[in-house]
Every structure is written in C-alpha cells, then in structure tokens.
Image (cartoon, rainbow, N blue to C red):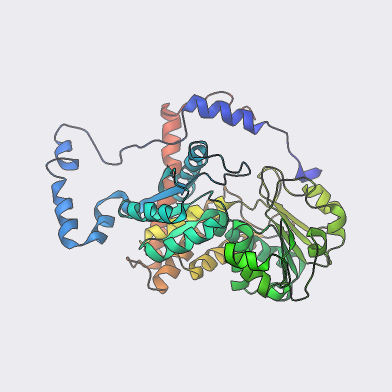
Amino acid sequence: MGSLGRRSVDWFSVSEELHRKYGGKIEIAPKVPLTRLEDFSVWYTPGVAAPCRRISEGGEDLSFDYTLRWNYAAVVSDGSRVLGLGDIGPEAALPVMEGKALLFKYLGGVDAVPLVVRERDPDRFVHLVKALEPSFGAVNLEDIESPKCFYVLERLQEVLDIPVWHDDQQGTALVTVAGLINAFKVVGKRLSNARIALVGAGAANVATYKYLKIVGADPRNMVVVDSRGVLHRERPDLEKLRVENPWKYAIALESNAEGIRGGIREAMRGADAVIAASSPGPGVIKKEWVAEMGKDPVVFAEANPVPEIWPWEAKEGGARVVATGRSDFPNQINNSLGFPAVFRGVLTVRARKMADEMFVAAAYALAEYAEERGIHEEYIVPRMDEEEAYVREAVAVAEKAMELGLARRTVGRRELEREVRELIERPKRYMRLALESGLIEIREPFGSW
C-alpha cells in the first residue's frame, strides 16, 4: 500500500482509556494575575461593577471589550447525528463537542465551550441558542440531523447578531472545495466544466453542492445521489421532497441536466470527480465504478471511520487523486483545517455574520497555501499541523468580513496578522509550559503509538 498505510493502532481503545484517565479534555483556567487578596477586589466585587455599568450605559457591544465574549464560541448539539454513530443523544455527544472545543483552542486560539442540549424541536432549539447569544461571540452547530440542520442554520443566521456556522455543512464543504480546486489543478481540469458526482445528500454534500456552485461549478454537470438513488426532476418522491426537504428538492430541479437515473455507479460513470459523504465503507463505492469514470478521476471518500472505498482500491480503479477523512492516509479532508481558522478570523474582528463570501475567502486561502507549498497527488490540502495555513485562512476571513461591512472592529493588515498569529501560537506555548511543569501529565498509553 506504500504511503497509503501506516502501523495499525486501536484508536477506539486508546481513546476510551485516556478519556477516563484524564476526566475529559479541557478545563477553565485564569488569564489574569491573582497574587494577593486585593486582586479579588479588581476582578470581582466591588471593582467588577465598573465594567458592568459601562456596558449597561454604553451598549451591549461593549461586552466584547470588557469580557471574554470577543473570543468565546458555543459548540452546540442536540446529539441527533453524531459522527457515524447516529442519534445517540446529548450526553453521548458531549465527548465530541468537548473535543471540538479542544481543537478550537489548540488550532485557532478560540475559547469554546461545549453545550449539549436535550431539545429536538427545531424552533425551540433556535430559541434556546438565541437566548444564549449575549454570552458568546460566535456559535458552532454540530452533529444535528438532516434536514433539520438546514432549517436551524438558516433561522439562526437570520436572528443572531453574531456568526453562526454548522461545521457538518460549512466546515466539511470548505475543506472539500479547497481540496477539489487543487485536485483539478493536479490533473489539469477546470471546475467550470467538470462532471462531478456527489454520493450522499446529507448536511455535508448539500453544503458542498451549494459552495461548489459559488466557486464556479455548473450545477447542470453535477449528479447527486441519496439513499433512494440519483436526484432528478422526475423522481416519484419529488413532491414529498418539496415538503420535507426543500434543500434536496432544489438540487433535484437544477442539477443533472442529462437526466441520469439509477444509483451511485450511474452517477459516477464518466465523472471527473466523485465526492462521497455517505455511509462508512468499504464497498459503498467499488473500484470497477472508479474505472468507469473519466480520465484521471478524482475520488474523495470522506465517510468516517471507514471511507466508502479504500484509497488503494480507488487507485487500482484508476483514480489519480484520492482523499479521505482520515489522518492515516494522504489528503485528509478534515473540518479541523477550517473551523478553528474561520472562527479565529470572525472573532478577531468581532463579526456580526458569516457570509458566503467569507467562506469562499477561507477556501481559496487554504487552497493557495497548499499550492504555494507544492501540490501533488498526495498533497492537495495542508496538514493539520501546518500552523501558517490557519494564520492565512483566518486573516482572509477577517479581511473579507471588514470588506463586507460585517465587522464591529477594523484592523489594519499588519496588526491583524500579528494578533491572529499570536492567538494561534499562544495555546502551544501554554501546552509546552504545562507539560514541562507537570500540570499536564503524559499518562500511558499516551505515546505508545
């Protein structure tokens, strides 16, 4: 398998043992000096009344100046669709949300708090998040079932005066779009006339479809497959889709100009790229179907923990570029390349909204960084440990927010880059100090791999 395989580790067993040993992954720590009794008079009573009065008299936006709100994000889920585990409930979803908060901090310098809620009604969920707004500078929605997730995101985008993002939609789509832009450069194809098959029509691929259109793909050349087969204008369940899932209904009307019918194989036949975000494999996509794609095809198999087709099988079928969602194969399409930097950007300028133009700026920044480093068949997006990619992406998002008039704060390019870099580097410095001082202990089996 060459570079497609590494030493096998039972990550599930290791993770379960270490979660129990550490009692979770994050904690709250002070960031102000506390060295004597009098300090409490500054940080709490009576001194704290001064910033309270200032905010009350000067307006709610001053809360960004006097509190952690300027760097505080909520990671909110109802636990209705968690990873590949499905509807496991809010308590079982908490480890994922806590992990998300860990990545927010370590990769983007963002203080995030995991919030799992026992609320399934979409309108009450929206009301709940709206009620939390005064505490936060941005909201990340996570692991909410489709199609409810589309409605919840759109409603919150309307009612919140802070950015809201659904990582299963926008996060996955961002890195997918960036990766596809570079994959097509590697194989010498143009996005504008490419035939693209999308396998799966849940949160990730509905968003990917939307943003591919925005960056130049022709919807008539895209064919989308859900669990019932290819979407097209004459599907028997079209009226039902119109009522129950208008987002998928719209795709059925404007995509697939050739009127292709059937399933995954038919959608892939002759395609330049397939983007699969569906059921864990292997075997969802077969190498024989890859062989029926166009010349030098691109295969993104993003299901976790097992991709729809193993990378070596896709290569055997003739794929030129293969990407998965896993870190142990080349070209990892991982949301973690997106959300920490995007939130770093919007929080640094205290943005009011998350516009599509900001998403596009992030995708191009990510793609351009990788291109400058030298893209090839096994490197189309940056790796998670390439810190400079996050800086570039965050700056691009922040600048676009200011350009669109969505920022509460205006910052020059040099100062913006300095702030972003410092905030992204800060958690790594804390980690080194904590490890050297023994505040964080390396416990077995950590490091055994």
Residue 392 is left or right of residue 266, and the answer is left
Residue 308 is left or right of residue 332, and the answer is right
Residue 284 seen in this snapshot: yes
- Name the image quarter holding residue 291: bottom right
* Residue 327 image position (x, y, % from top left): 65, 44
* Residue 112 image position (x, y, % from top left): 41, 46
Check the image and name the residue furthest to the left.
46
Could you tell me which residue is drawn at 52 percent across and 65 percent down? 359
Q: Is residue 79 above or below residue 205?
A: above
* Residue 252 image position (x, y, % from top left): 68, 70
* Residue 328 image position (x, y, % from top left): 69, 42
Residue 178 seen in this snapshot: no
Quarter holding the C terminus is top right
Q: How many marks?
A: 0
- Name the image quarter holding residue 11: top right
Could you tell me which residue is drawn at 24 percent across and 59 percent down? 60
379, 278: nearer the viewer: 278
- Name the image quarter holding residue 295: bottom right
Quarter holding the N terminus is top right
Residue 378 is left or right of residue 44, and the answer is right
